[in-house]
Amino acid sequence: MRRVFIQGLAVLGLLLAQGAALAQTPGAPLLTIGGEVNQPLALTRADLQALPRKDYTEDRRVTQDGKDATLTVRYQGVPLRDLIDKAGLVPDRRAVRKAIVLLTAKDGYQASYSWGELYNSALGDGVVVVLRQGSDDLLDTDGLPALRSLQDLRPGPRHVRWLQRVDVLLPTSATP
């Protein structure tokens, strides 16, 4: 049983390494923006690196050795709204107000935001596609960007590591 578990871990490690290698293929899209947008985007490593970045900091409260401490984490990235705006939202103003933005990671993890959270509240200012965390360039270390929601009270559930897709979805029913 233990041998099978260890072999399984070895295979998983190999698959992750192959996935990172594929993500590093020059010219291959790392992040796609799709769904109900005017111009779907397939952003390569070069595209992501060429985007204008902003600096962010996040103060995290942690407990170490029974003592509370504040850890300051520095990020560099692009506001999610800027990428969605670059793709262009559908022109129907009323329909877009009901939109959901679905974020999908390489491992299948998903998180979502409403249009109102991103465009009609202060929360949207802190939803960032992270390209650098501290001194680490995430495109080098992870092969993909991440997403952080710096304004959430509990940021963990909407922290998306290995971000691959951003889809703007509209409800299927046209209820008033």
Image (cartoon, grey):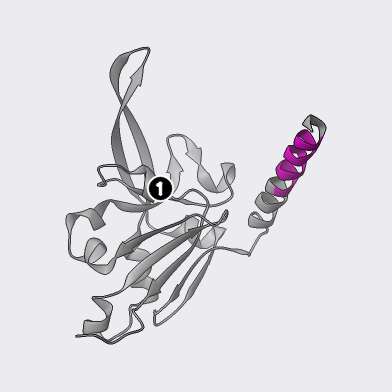
Query: Residue at image x 45%, y 43%?
Result: 132
- Depth order, front residue of 26/126: 126
Q: Position of residue 150 (x, y in %)?
A: 29, 45
- Depth order, front residue of 32/53: 32
Picture quarter with the C terminus: bottom left
Q: Compared to 135, does 115 lie above or below?
A: below
Q: Position of residue 78 (x, y in %)?
A: 37, 55
Relative to 80, 118 lies left or right: left
Magenta stretch: includes residue 29: no
Q: Quadrant of residue 116?
A: bottom left
Q: Position of residue 16 (x, y in %)?
A: 68, 47
Residue with the mark numbered 1: 159
Q: Compared to 115, does 79 lie above or below?
A: above
Query: Residue at image x 77%, y 44%?
Result: 11
Query: Residue at image x 55%, y 48%?
Result: 139
Picture quarter with the N terminus: top right
Q: Quadrant of residue 22?
A: bottom right
What is the magenta range? 4-15
Magenta stretch: includes residue 12: yes
Q: Quadrant of residue 63?
A: top left
Residue at disc 1, secondary structure: loop
- Depth order, front residue of 39/6: 6
- Depth order, front residue of 75/103: 103
Q: Compared to 63, does 28 lie above or below?
A: below
Query: Residue at image x 51%, y 45%?
Result: 138
Mark 1 residue type = His
Query: Crowdedness of circle 1 by 10 Å Cα count: few (<14), some, many (20+)?
Result: many
Q: Position of residue 51 (x, y in %)?
A: 42, 59
